[in-house]
Amino acid sequence: MATRAQPVVMMGSWMLVTGLASLFAGDFSGMIPEPTGTTAVATNAGYAKLFAELGAGSLAVGIMLVVLIPFLRKLISDKAETPIVEAATVVPVA
């Protein structure tokens, strides 16, 4: 995935994403209220609601990205087809 010159950047990105995922996991687990009972049945409803919301959000983002594919392809191809303008060489007149 990465070129030989960029393994440090890729490893740093991996560590950053892992840290953010851990931070978000802590925030999401704080959304679950303290269970009133000691059985799993008492807490399953809270977790089911949370995971349903996370799943719906993931689906919405996925659909949005699929809709944006043509725009992103056009944006990428426009940049690839832009001609490179070379700077003119200035020659001093003696």
Image (spheres, rainbow, N blue to C red):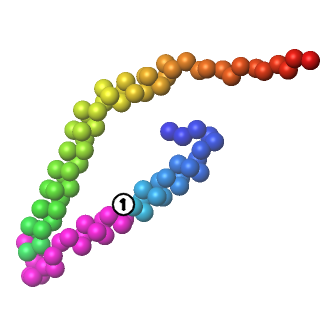
Extreme residue in the front direction: 94
- Quarter containing the C terminus: top right
Image coordinates for residue 40, horizontal then vertical, percent: 11, 73
Q: Residue at x 53, y 48 (%)?
A: 10
* Residue bearing the label numbered 1: 21
Image coordinates for residue 38, horizontal then vertical, percent: 12, 81
Q: Which residue is drawn at 14% across and 56% down?
A: 52
* The one of 14 and 88 positioned closer to us in this rendering: 88
- Residue range of the region highlighted in magenta in the rendering: 21-41
Position of 67 with respect to 89 (left or right) is: left
Q: Residue at x 15, y 65 (%)?
A: 47
Is-magenta flag for residue 83? no
* The one of 88 and 55 positioned closer to us in this rendering: 88
Residue 71 vertical placement versus 20 (above, below): above
Which secondary structure, mark 1?
helix
**Three-letter residue code for mark 1:** Ala
Image coordinates for residue 42, horizontal then vertical, percent: 8, 75
Q: Residue at x 10, y 77 (%)?
A: 39
Position of 71 with respect to 94 (left or right) is: left
